[in-house]
Each structure stands twice: as C-alpha cells, then as structure tokens.
Image (cartoon, rainbow, N blue to C red):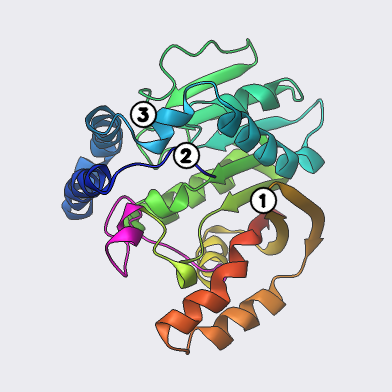
Amino acid sequence: MKTPKRSLERLKYHYSVERELADQLRAASKSERKHLYTSLYNELFVRVPDHPQNLLKLPNPLKLAEVERQFCLLRPFLKKTTVYLEIGAGDCALAIKVAQAVSHVFALDVSDEISSGVSFPVNCDLIIADGTEIPVPPGSVDLAYSNQLMEHLHPDDAAEQLAQVFQALQRGGVYICVTPNRLCGPHDISKLFDTVPKGFHLREYNNTDLIEDFHLVGFRRFRAMFSYKGVVFPLLVSLWPILMYERLISALPRRLMRWLAYPLISVKFVAFKV
C-alpha cells in the first residue's frame, strides 16, 4: 500500500516519536498497558499528522483500493447472516463496507482518533477497547479479522487477546489474521533505520509462531490463503509446505533470508474454531 512520499527529516521524526512511545508500552506493567494502548496511539496520530493512517483517512484512490483489496479477501466468508468482528478497525472504512453484506459488524480499535467524524450504519458498532479485551458476546462471531494488528500487541498481551477472540467466535467460526512475516522484517517505521522492530511492532511473527500461539488458546485447524497486490486466491491450502520453507530459510544469513522470505507476505493465516 503506497502513501505520499515523506522527506527523510519527517521519517526520522516519525521514527523518534514512535520509538519513544513504543518504549513506554514495552516497559509498562500489564495494568498500565490497558490504558496506554489508547492514549499512546492517540498521541502518535496527533504528533505525527503525516502518519500514513492519518493520510489514508482522507478520501483518495489509495484508500479505496486498499479497502477493496481487503474486502476481496473476506468476500468468500461473508453471508447475509454473518456477524463480523474487525480487530484494529482504524478508520472503519472496511468495516462499513462489510456491513453492507452481513448481518452485524463489531469494529474494534484502541483509538477513536482515526475514526473521528465517521458516520456508521445501524448494523455497525464501534467499540473502543484496551488493546486486549474483545467485549462482544461469547460465541456471537462468525468471522473475525485483523490486518497488521497482532504485531502491535505487547507479547504478554497477545495470548490474552487470542483467547478472547476464540471465546467470541462461535463453533465453526473463522479468524483471518494478517500480520507481516518477521523473516523479511522489520516492517514498522524502524525498517528504515534498524534490523529489528523498535517502533509499535512489539513482536513480529512467522507462521510457525502463529500456530504455536493460536494452538495454546484452543484453535486446532489452520490454513493459508494467498493475496498479493490486490489479487486474491480464495483457495484454502495447507500451511505445512510454508512452515517447512520458513524453517529452511531461517538458518540462512539475514540478508539472504529476508530476500527469500519476501514471497511470504502473500500468505494470510486462517484459523478455525472446531
């Protein structure tokens, strides 16, 4: 997803602000983090007005194309009776589009700064939560979706949120978790300045990591979908070849590993509650 180019000075400023705020989150206690997710992200978007998420809030072809790309990924799972949960809904443009095709939408985020001024349809509820809580009725959700969200959670909070997503899903429900593969990272603003994520990507994952963490909270069936540059391949496939490929390249020198891992950005992780 491309956004207008920023000067090196503005990128360095963004990096310094995000690293400062992320360090606060990394060092915070669990009780402190429940409030910090919301306050720190609001502060980031205010202090960095040219942040890509602020820019994509404005109507433009980039935003429309990104919403359509994600909607195409979700479309095979959407029915008129579907209850949809989006975790990390941002400006809620995707949630609002999905609301046209389903029964009900829960749009969940830690910050209301990006979605301020947005008008919601009657079947779409905006929920501001603390970063780990999923405050929807247990067993009420058919399809949960997050895009570039899990890597923003403090590692100690990720299992708690996953457990709550699992509880929110009804049996047979699906969670599509799109997160950047750590083998070709880092993927936050620190990618321009560091070899490991030091911004708001508090932990990046590969598919092996995801299976381990999802399995711990109760998920037992996992598949992959592929999507690249707006082209979606809706066929669900086994993750095992991908896991073997990750294991093979992870032992290589970092530069070669990153280059070989780049195709893994097309993999979308899909978990089922069985």
Q: Of the residues under marks 1 and 2, which one precedes in the sequence?
A: 2
Q: Of the residues under marks 3 and 2, which one precedes in the sequence?
A: 2
Given residues 195 and 273, the one toward you in this image is: 195
What residue is pinned by disc 1? 229
Discs 3/2, front: 2
Q: Give the main secondary structure, helix, strand or loop, of the magenta stretch.
A: loop
- The percent position of residue 89, horizontal first and vertical second, equals 51, 32
Tell me the distance, in whole angstroms, between the alpha carbons under discs 3 and 1. 28 Å
Q: Find the magenta span and give its range.
A: 189-207
Question: What mark, if any, has residue 3 been given in the picture?
Answer: 2
What residue is pinned by disc 3? 111
**Residue drawn at (57%, 79%) of the image:** 246
Question: What mark, if any, has residue 98 been given in the picture?
Answer: none
Snapshot quadrant of residue 254: bottom left
Q: Is residue 205 highlighted in magenta? A: yes
> What is the count of numbered marks?
3
Given residues 269 and 83, the one toward you in this image is: 269
Q: Could you tell me the amino acid type at mark 1?
A: Lys
Q: Of the residues under marks 3 and 1, which one precedes in the sequence?
A: 3
Discs 3/1, front: 1
Q: Could you tell me the amino acid type at mark 3?
A: Ser
Figure quadrant of the N terminus = top right
Q: Is residue 22 left or right of residue 106?
A: left
**Residue drawn at (57%, 34%) of the image:** 62
- The percent position of residue 153, horizontal first and vertical second, equals 37, 50
Mark 2 residue crowding within 10 angstroms, few (<14) / some (14–19) / many (20+): few
